Image (cartoon, helix red, strand yellow):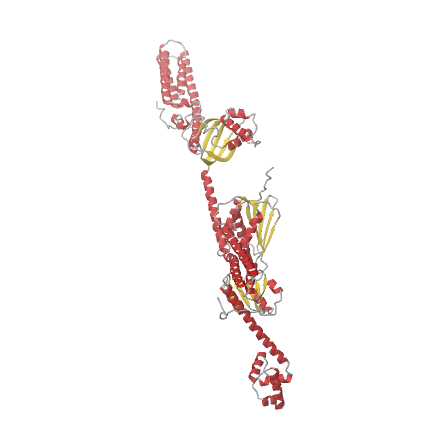
Amino acid sequence: MIRPTPRATPAQTPGPEAIVIIVDDDASVRESLDSLLRSVGFATRQHASPAELLATPIPDMPGCIILDVRLPGISGLDLQAELARIGVAMPIVFMTGFGDVPMSVRAMKSGAVDFLPKPFRDQDMLDAVATAVGRDKDRRRTALAAHELRQRYETLSLREREVMAHVVTGLMNKQVAGLIGLSEITVKIHRGNAMRKMQAKSLAELVRQAEALGLPRP
Amino acid sequence: MSGDMAGNGDGPVDGHATNHIPSASAPSPPGGGRRNGPEVNRKSLLAIALLLALAIFLVDTTSPVEGAVAVLYVVVVVLAARTGRRRDILAAAGFTIVLTMAAYLDTHGLEHAGSFTLRAIVSLSAIAITAVLALQGCEATAALMRSESRYRRMFDASRIGVVEEDWRALRAAAAGGGQASRPGRPGADDIRCQEIQRLRSLIRMIDINPAMLAMLNRGPAAPGDAGTGNLGFVSDRAFAETLDAFRRGEPFFEHESELIRPDGTRIPCLYTVTFPPPGDPEGTVLIFVVDISERRQAQDALLAAQSELAHASRTATLGELSASIAHEVNQPLMAVVTNGEAGLRWLHRATPDLGEVDQALRRIVAEGNRASQIVARIRSFLKKAPVQQELLGVVAIIDEAVLLVERELLAAQVALEIEIAPDLPPVRGDRIQLQQILVNLMVNASQALTSRNAGRRLRLTAALQDDGCIAITVADNGPGIGEADLPRLFEAFFTTRQHGMGMGLAICRTTAEAHGGHLSVDSRPGEGASFQLRLPAIIVEDAAA
């Protein structure tokens, strides 16, 4: 079995803020997984088919999707591709009744967190779900930070953005002033405003933020 | 005389040939006595003839009687003819002609001719004519005897059991009665039985051949033996049917029945009874019996082999389904384990949630049952049981077959439509074998459909047709079957698959035919294939009718 991360100890109480979406055509499998996941504190949702999943909006909270590889209508792998296409970034844990190596490789390459052959040990499933949820939380945190940074950047005036763009390339205030035709003192004020608005404590941090924002070189 | 040189080509019929009768059939038809000691008989006949000839010669040469004494030689020729041998007749004729001539020469000499010469010529003519007639008669008798001998040999050497019986008394008695096998009122059965016994006792056995005796495991029997005669070797029912055919005036009756030996053992046999035409005063009935136990054994062996092969094919089919079967069995097992773990976790929480534990346990029980049902279904499909003949509902056969392949179809992303006409009559046969046909057809269709990228459809319909057959159709929208492959599709070892054994469809067709039905295919390349299984519907009659 392919394991992308070292085995993580599942969170004692992941909190009801995480949801697990179970997609399997077999009601008994869904029910049992549902019970297991609820017993350790996850919120759950069940779907009998990919179509049902796609027809329901994915809630805006951390979580993961458990998919059977063989599903009616469309295979789990195709569903994975479809979810990626429509922008659902929730991590996926696959289950399969057929220990199929090529299939698991493809699934892992497409970003699956784990590939569990049925029947699996419940601890393996809980570990895989915990890893997936943890990864989703990280992803959401990163996404959130990027979002906040972008919002801060939006508050900068055009001049401040211009000054920031030059400063992060490593130019001195005097050089920047020469390039954009301002006095050195004015550049210094714009630079101070930009760092305050971006909540950058140092020039190094401002450089990292510029990189995260993907600012074009002037 | 050298007439007793047997085997002489143009000689008379060899008396020994006609006497070649085993003691078993010693009671031969009238005239059998004539064949007893023919050699003695012949010698005495010839002796008498010789003496008579000499006596006539003496009278002819010594007595002064003016007359054609030599005409009396005719009696000698006739006596010799009694032996039935050409040689004897020729010898007698020649001998008497010589005597006539000798007497003539002795008495009259050659110098004169007169009325005595005419008398001599008349005598010679009489002898010659008698000889010719006797020879002709002898020839006819010989032909008759050859014919008799030929039929006797057929009767004796045949491997077919033959019994000859006299039904004249029966015919007289039966002329008044009704049909023997008509189902009677309650209580009438005994009367009918007695009637049949009585009618049987009227039959007199005339002859029975060795093959029949061997079949009955009996030694030589006396005629009229109650055990062998009177069709005693067939059951009362078979006899009653025979009697009905006799009464209807049919020329013969043929029936597959059992031969009952005196010790009670039975062997399957085919028996044919030929009745005499109504006007025939002889009224001899011939019964031919053929032992078909070997044929029956061969049939049984064939059935057993077919059943073995069908079993092997079932095993192979399930082998192809092994992945989906594993999945099917794994699902409930997995659910059991997961439910168990979930239940434990609910129980071990700081405040145990007994409602959830209860739910989990209920699901465990349900899943355990489901798993055992799946295993039972597969086991029953793989069971090696003798072929059953039972009334089966079409819906049940289809449902069980579908349960076996549902997973496989799902995995192959084939959409299955089922359409069964309501109130279908049942069919008769073996549940597993009929299921096997449907499973095979559906698995084949599913494999054919893999060449299609989307919209894989399989349609299963069942309906009653006008001709009283139930038609179950399995149709797919796959690539169809090539025109060149179509005629060979049901041949053994014909397969279009790389790893196929080519037995599946061959066995399916054999199975369908063993059920009195038929399996056919209709396909247009590119539009899919449609297999149709036709089985005779069994109309269950109301018990009161």
Pinpoint residue B309: horizontal percent, then vertical percent: 47, 49
Q: Considering depth in this image, is B196 or A64 the residue closer to the camera? A: A64
User: Most extreme residue toward the front, as rendered?
Assistant: B351
- Please state if A186 lies on the left or on the right of B237 as rendered: right
Q: Considering depth in this image, is B495 or B172 the residue closer to the camera? A: B172
Image quarter in which the C terminus of chain B is found? top right
Q: Quadrant of residue B187?
A: top right
Q: Considering depth in this image, is B500 or B381 the residue closer to the camera? A: B381
Can residue B19 be seen in the rendering of this structure? yes
Pinpoint residue A204: horizontal percent, then vertical percent: 55, 83
Pinpoint residue B296: horizontal percent, then vertical percent: 47, 40
Can residue A28 be seen in the rendering of this structure? no
Q: Considering depth in this image, is B533 or B33 the residue closer to the camera? A: B533
Pinpoint residue B24: horizontal percent, then vertical percent: 41, 28
Measuring 59% from the left and 38% from the top, which residue is drawn there?
Answer: B543
Relative to B445, residue B127 above or below = above
Image quarter in which the N terminus of chain B is found? top left
Relative to A153, residue B231 above or below = above
- Please state if B463 lies on the left or on the right of B59 as rendered: right
